[in-house]
Amino acid sequence: MFSSFSYFPFSKLPYQVRFLSKRLSKSATKRIPLTTKRARKGYYKGKGSTKEGHLTSKSKFIVNWNKRLELIVPNLEDFKLKPYIASTVSKIPPEKRESPMG
């Protein structure tokens, strides 16, 4: 009817029984892609980006210039606003400052 091994504890079985765990081994976690569920708090993977080319079979990246991001910057001559500068910066330019040596 039943085999005699079915009533013995696992330590007395003639073969090893491998139990599958919910957790992955340390070596297995290195091989799978990192996701937001497997990373620590604060990891942000991003939304992805546009592909600006492709990889060849020899892992060389070929740029497709039609897909490159092109930034169009307006002419900033005669622009009255200044960039943000901290209040601790001296208002006297370095060329006009008196040197402490002379």
Image (tube, grey):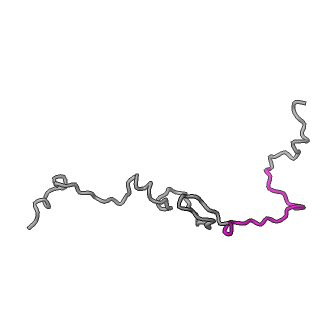
Front one among 39 and 54: 54
Q: The C terminus lies in which quarter of the figure?
A: top right
Question: Does 84 lie within the magenta span?
Answer: yes
At 37% across and 58% down in the image, what residue appears?
A: 23
Q: How many labels does the image show?
A: 0
- Left or right, 35 with reference to 49: left
Front one among 57 and 66: 57
At 14% across and 57% down in the image, what residue appears?
A: 8
Residue 17 place in picture, x, y as percent: 23, 57
The secondary structure that most of the magenta stretch takes on is loop
Residue 54 place in picture, x, y as percent: 59, 64
At 62% across and 67% down in the image, what residue appears?
A: 50
Front one among 66 and 41: 66
Task: Check the image and report above or below for 67 versus 40.
Answer: below
Q: What stretch is highlighted in magenta?
A: 65-86
What is the quadrant of residue 21 in the picture? bottom left
Q: The N terminus lies in which quarter of the figure?
A: bottom left
What is the quadrant of residue 67 in the picture? bottom right
Question: Does 10 lie within the magenta span?
Answer: no
Residue 27 place in picture, x, y as percent: 40, 52
Residue furthest out toward the top: 101
Residue furthest out toward the left: 1
At 35% across and 60% down in the image, what residue appears?
A: 22
- Left or right, 25 with reference to 91: left
